[in-house]
Image (cartoon, grey):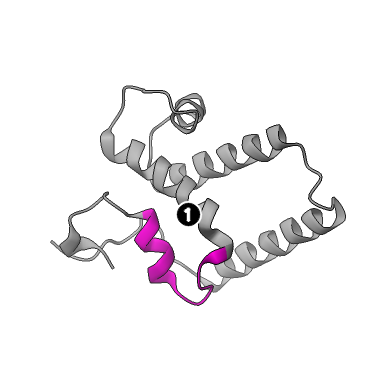
Amino acid sequence: MGEYKPPFHMTDRITNLVATICEQVGRITVLSHGNLSPHLKKENRIRTIHSSLAIEQNSLLLEQVTAILDGKRILGNPNEIREVKNAYDTYELLLSLNPYSVEEMWGIMRKEAFPKDMRL
């Protein structure tokens, strides 16, 4: 089996858009002094995870992603369920990860999703 290849091609434009989004999120965080309600933070994180995984062809619905992150069991593809859990773990550890290491982030995102010989 070969190396994992996402169903999109990373371009400079995508990288710049992601950087711009991160910059705006940082501004909002600073301006709100971290006073966003916990419910709003959780809801935004769930929507972000759902949208990010949908780009990767994850077919789980927003309600299913919410249920998984609330610790409930759902019927669905075990790999897609694992992707949701791994994405959540990645977001939780985001500030402690090396920003220059794609492998570190992908190591968490793909944890238990593929056999060891397919990981980065």
Q: Which residues are magenta?
A: 96-109
Residue 79 appears in which quarter of the rendering? top left
Secondary structure mostly seen in magenta is helix
Q: Which residue is mark 1?
A: 90
Asked if residue 97 is positioned above or below residue 89 in the image, the reply reads below
- Residue positioned 33% across, 55% down in the render: 110
Spot occupied by residue 15 in the image (x, y as percentages of width and height): 56, 69
Q: Quadrant of residue 115?
A: bottom left
Q: Is residue 48 above or below residue 94?
A: above
Q: Amino acid type of disc 1?
A: Thr
Q: Is residue 82 left or right of residue 72?
A: left
Residue 35 magenta-highlighted: no
Q: Quadrant of the N terminus?
A: bottom left
Q: Secondary structure at mark 1?
A: helix
Q: Position of residue 100 (x, y in %)?
A: 50, 77
View extreme (left): residue = 1
Residue 92 image position (x, y, % from top left): 54, 51
Query: Which residue is the extreme one toward the right?
Result: 31
Residue 60 percent coordinates (x, y): 41, 31
Q: Residue at x 18, y 60 (%)?
A: 116
Report the residue that reaches farthest toward the bottom: 100
Q: Quadrant of the C terminus?
A: bottom left
Of the pair 80 and 94, the residue shown nearer to us: 94
In the image, is residue 46 above or below residue 5?
above
Residue 105 is a magenta residue = yes
Foreground residue, 13 or 42? Answer: 42
- Left or right of 18 on screen, residue 111: left
Residue placed at 41% from the left, 68% from the top?
Answer: 104
